Image (tube, rainbow, N blue to C red):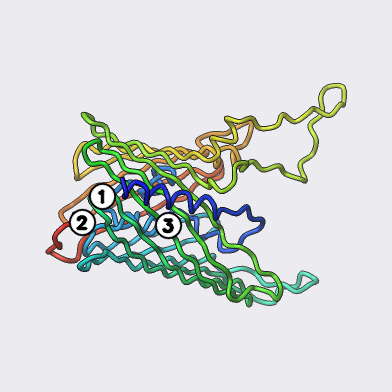
Amino acid sequence: MKRALVFIGLASTLSLQAQQGGSQSYAFLNLESSARVAATGGSLLSIQDDDPNTAFINPSLLDTNMHGALALNYINYFAGINYLYAGYVHSFKDITASANLMYLNYGKFTRTDDLGNVTGEFTANDMVLSVGASKRIDSAFSLGANVKIINSVLESYTSFGAAVDLSGTYRNLGKNFSASILMRNVGMQFSTYTDDNRQPLPFGIDLGFSKRAAKAPFILHVLLKDLQRWDLTYTDPNAEPELDFNGDTVAVKAPGFLNKFMRHVNLGLEFSPSQAFFIDFGFNYRRRQELKLDNRPGLVGFSIGTGIKIKRFRFSYGRSSYHRAGGSNHITITTNILKSKPKKNT
């Protein structure tokens, strides 16, 4: 009972510290870091297995079964943007720790003066280095934290900041169920791109659930994202009013309760008939509503991926559909560089 109160208390603390921000810096911190995460629609917050990529999202998922795990990721994004993510996990006596690095390269841009004359080229990149640790309280509860050092370079403008993630995870092995709560990106800019232009970080509170079917090779993932703010709908201030046949303005219907609720929901489904093969599916309702074309929505908001394990290596691919113009492609390789594993914490 005392352990349950600790978990509930953590959740309450996160809710009390929630803030509703305006414009934000370092939005890249919310990018999907691995093929499996992308393929499940970003819903992979609470699954506890041997995948080291989950620790970058939720540090309380770090466990001794990840000891020696190395993850390498390459993501082909949009318009020549590429990013890399690498992570390593090591277990010590009482804690399991990780080191992670994400680097984004936005490519080359043409530099012009005020009159539009070309004066050369410039580049832009973002980077975050994080160190995380997790401690298991007992067989059901674990707590974790990530510390992030952030650097951003946009032409001649640079910014430096830091943030922390705090999380807790509950698991019930008998019922194949796990749940996690996460408070992400609590921090600030230490130096800003320009003077007197300090912006908040992309702070958020997330709640995730994972449930493995008792007699079938399926795992359902549900993520409730950005709980610090109820209304996530966006109204374009520059949108032209819609007119009817008489030339009168058509009243815009305000989003209802279900629409607002679903914008917090990401869904993922994993089909894993064996430890050597899996297929993932995902759906992000908010992404679909914000990026689809009304007359041709296509598969915007949906994602898919697969993976195989060959000896000590696991190869994964994931694709997320953002727009009719294309999506992101994620390639992940994970392996264990150590032969022995420490005894599991109980």
Q: Tags 1 and 2 in contact by the CB under 8 Å rule?
A: yes
Vertical placement of residue 169 versus 90, above or below: above
Disc nearer the start of the sequence (1/2)? 1
Residue 258 position, x and y percent, is 57, 30
Quarter containing the C terminus: bottom left
Circle 3 residues within 10 Å: few <14, some 14–19, many ≥20 = many
Q: Is residue 300 left or right of residue 4?
A: right
Quadrant of residue 166 within the rendered picture: bottom left
Give the labeled residue for mark 3.
75
Q: Tags 3 and 2 in contact by the CB under 8 Å rule?
A: no
Q: CA distance from mark 1 to mark 3?
A: 23 Å
Residue depth check, mark 3 versus mark 2: number of the one nearer the observer: 2
Q: Is residue 344 left or right of residue 30?
A: left
- The kind of secondary structure element at disc 2 is helix
Checking the image for residue 74, the label placed there is none
Quadrant of residue 202 within the rendered picture: bottom right
Disc nearer the start of the sequence (3/2)? 2
Residue 61 position, x and y percent, is 32, 54
Q: Is residue 4 left or right of residue 297?
A: left
Checking the image for residue 65, the label placed there is 2
Residue depth check, mark 1 versus mark 3: number of the one nearer the observer: 1
Callout 2 amino acid: Asn
Give the labeled residue for mark 1.
49
Quarter containing the N terminus: top left
Q: CA distance from mark 1 to mark 2?
A: 7 Å
Vertical placement of residue 73 versus 213, above or below: below
Residue 288 position, x and y percent, is 55, 38
